[in-house]
């Protein structure tokens, strides 16, 4: 199952490092990253494969959310199907 | 392959435009609970509901978290109690309503619907007991919703029931007067009620349904409004196309949620109800869509046409996105549950008479309208008869959910909180009586269009 992680917030050092570290610790494999800075705001969309991971999705979501709040960014992790069904027939 | 724009669009719909799945509703048949002893019947009902829906709320919450789409309510609908309890030797079904309430609280759902009777052609003994139990049942429970279907295109209108429901609504208002007649917000009078509607207060589990089904009601007026904001001055072809595309996207999410819920609960998927269901929150309003189309204040001339276009385009777009469509499917126009409608009533652009015209082209009918508490039962029955006639002749579902708030006058406000919202008292302009008309009773015969065979 693929996971879509979106990160939005004020730019600072180490956002990508933190997110990728959490994913690596939980054996979640990153497939693609798209990131940019717009008007000082950090935007990242990351797609990852979660099938090999042992952690429950809701737990991973909780960790990402809490760690994100610590550095003032919003992190959302969603099952990719919500995007697939909405945008492809 | 999903693109970044797709991901951003979906998440913007959820966070900024308040896209949500309004409800996952589990329909449960109570036909196998029948028992002559009402206490035993209530135990059977409680056991069946709590067993069948044990994991409904948890499943809804899991899906919500996994996909990041808010699922606002989890609900249950049951076989109309007038049918399920018909075998009970009793003169009141209030204990059944209390058993439903207890079961709903036990499994943690937001509402349970089905304290209902289907009487478009006549009453059984059970129907009479149920209707007489409605005021007390709604006063002594929190989550139970009640509905009565008193007309259909096939059968005509049961005018005896029309007369009685005016009185029942008044009595319900009186018994819940310390909560501003909240009981009436949980009571709907229908013509052509569908048996697979997941929305409250009119949900019940139709007699032709399977033992258990899962249905989903989608929402998303804010998303449609947002899509139309980029089309200033565009013609109606373009407007209709945009609404269709947006409705398609909204419904696909509903279909995904329904499919997952069905799989995880091991219960067949019933239908998706393609609805634009507003909330009192700013940015989640059907009235504001109508205004976006160029009507200065909802209710001004052109409103009915705008709503007709909206309602039709939503169905066309949504239909393709789901394997089974049913329920009410269309744009809801509840007054107290829609920020734009509330505002329109306050500024005087929207009246109950205009709302009646709008019900010819919307998904249901006169919904969540607070009126003066001293409105007579016959006037309320007259309003019900008019709505039922619109439904009967136009082969559509219509309904009345009016709230005669005791002690309140035009100009005052009532507040119910949550999804039920708040509303100014809406004036019923005609001061003339419908008493003699309503007193006649009997049945309005089925219309010529019922003879389709």
Image (spheres, rainbow, N blue to C red):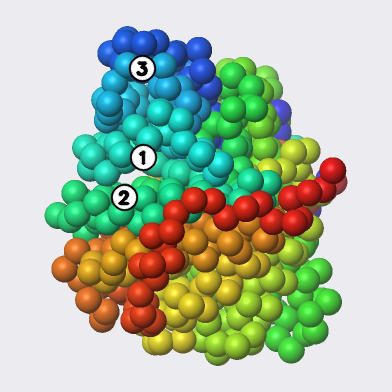
Q: Which mark is residue B344?
A: none
Rendered image quadrant of residue B81: top left
The disc at residue B168 is 2
Of all chains, the one bearing label 1 is B
The residue indicated by pointer 1 is: B131
- Residue drawn at the location 59% of the way across and 19% of the way down: B211
Numbered disc 2: what chain? B
Residue B425 drawn above or below residue B41: below
Name the N-terminal-most of marks 2 and 3: 3
In percent of the image, x 40 and y 28: which residue is there? B125
Label 2: how many Cα within 10 Å (few below 14, some 14–19, many 20+):
many
Q: Residue at x 83, y 77 (%)?
A: B237
Corner quadrant of residue B448: bottom right
Q: Which residue is mark 3?
A: B88
- The answer to whether one can see residue B23 in this image is no
Q: Quick one: SS at disc 1?
A: helix
Mark 1 closeness class: few <14, some 14–19, many ≥20 residues within 10 Å: many
Name the N-terminal-most of marks 1 and 3: 3
- The reply to whether the C-beta atoms of the residues labelled 1 and 3 are less than 8 Å apart is no
Label 2–label 1 contact, CB within 8 A: yes
* Distance from Cα at disc 2 to Cα at disc 1: 8 Å
Query: Looking at the rendering, which quadrant does residue B315 occupy?
Result: bottom right
């Amino acid at each position: 199952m693929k996971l879509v992680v979106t990160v939005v917030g004020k730019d600072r050092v180490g956002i990508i490092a933190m997110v990728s570290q959490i994913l690596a610790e939980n054996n979640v494999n990153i497939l693609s990253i798209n990131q940019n800075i717009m008007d000082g705001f950090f935007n990242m969309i990351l797609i990852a494969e979660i099938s090999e991971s042992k952690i429950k999705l809701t737990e991973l979501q909780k960790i990402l959310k809490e760690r994100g709040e610590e550095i003032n960014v919003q992190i959302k992790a969603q099952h990719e199907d919500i995007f697939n069904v909405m945008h492809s027939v | 392959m999903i693109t970044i724009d797709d991901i951003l669009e979906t998440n913007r719909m959820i966070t900024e435009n308040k896209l949500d799945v309004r409800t996952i509703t589990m329909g449960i048949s109570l036909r196998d609970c029948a028992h002559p002893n009402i206490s035993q019947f209530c135990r059977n009902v409680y056991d069946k509901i709590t067993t069948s829906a044990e994991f409904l709320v948890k499943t809804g919450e899991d899906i919500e978290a996994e996909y990041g789409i808010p699922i606002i309510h989890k609900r249950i609908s049951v076989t109309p109690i007038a049918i399920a309890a018909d075998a009970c030797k009793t003169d009141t079904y209030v204990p059944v309503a209390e058993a439903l309430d207890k079961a709903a609280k036990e499994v943690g759902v937001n509402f349970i619907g089905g304290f209902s009777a289907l009487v478009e052609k006549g009453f059984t003994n059970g129907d009479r007991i149920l209707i007489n139990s409605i005021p007390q049942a709604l006063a002594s429970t929190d989550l139970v919703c009640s509905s009565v279907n008193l007309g259909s295109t096939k059968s005509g209108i049961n005018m005896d029931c029309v007369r009685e429901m005016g009185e029942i609504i008044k009595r319900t208002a009186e018994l819940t007067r310390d909560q501003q007649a909240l009981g009436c917000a949980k009571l709907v009078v229908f013509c052509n009620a569908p048996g697979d509607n997941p929305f409250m207060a009119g949900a019940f589990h139709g007699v032709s349904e399977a033992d258990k089904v899962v249905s989903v009601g989608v929402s998303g007026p804010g998303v449609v409004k947002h899509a139309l904001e980029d089309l200033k001055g565009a013609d109606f072809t373009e407007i209709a196309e945009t609404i269709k595309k947006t409705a398609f996207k909204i419904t696909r999410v509903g279909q995904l949620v329904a499919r997952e819920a069905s799989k995880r609960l091991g219960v067949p998927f019933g239908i998706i109800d393609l609805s634009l269901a507003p909330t009192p929150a700013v940015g989640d309003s059907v009235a504001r869509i109508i205004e976006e189309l160029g009507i200065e204040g909802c209710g001004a001339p052109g409103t009915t046409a705008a709503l007709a276009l909206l309602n039709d385009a939503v169905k066309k777009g949504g239909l393709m996105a789901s394997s089974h469509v049913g329920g009410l499917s269309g744009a809801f126009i509840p007054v107290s549950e829609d920020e734009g409608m509330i505002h329109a009533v306050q500024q005087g652009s929207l009246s109950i008479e205009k709302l009646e015209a709008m019900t010819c082209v919307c998904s249901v009918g006169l919904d969540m309208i607070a009126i003066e508490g001293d409105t007579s039962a016959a006037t309320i029955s007259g309003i019900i008869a008019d709505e039922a006639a619109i439904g009967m002749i136009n082969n559509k579902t219509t309904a009345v959910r009016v709230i005669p708030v005791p002690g309140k006058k035009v100009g005052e406000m009532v507040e119910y909180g949550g999804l039920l919202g708040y509303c100014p008292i809406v004036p019923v302009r005609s001061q003339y009586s419908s008493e003699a008309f309503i007193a006649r009773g009997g049945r309005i015969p089925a219309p010529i269009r019922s003879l389709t065979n």
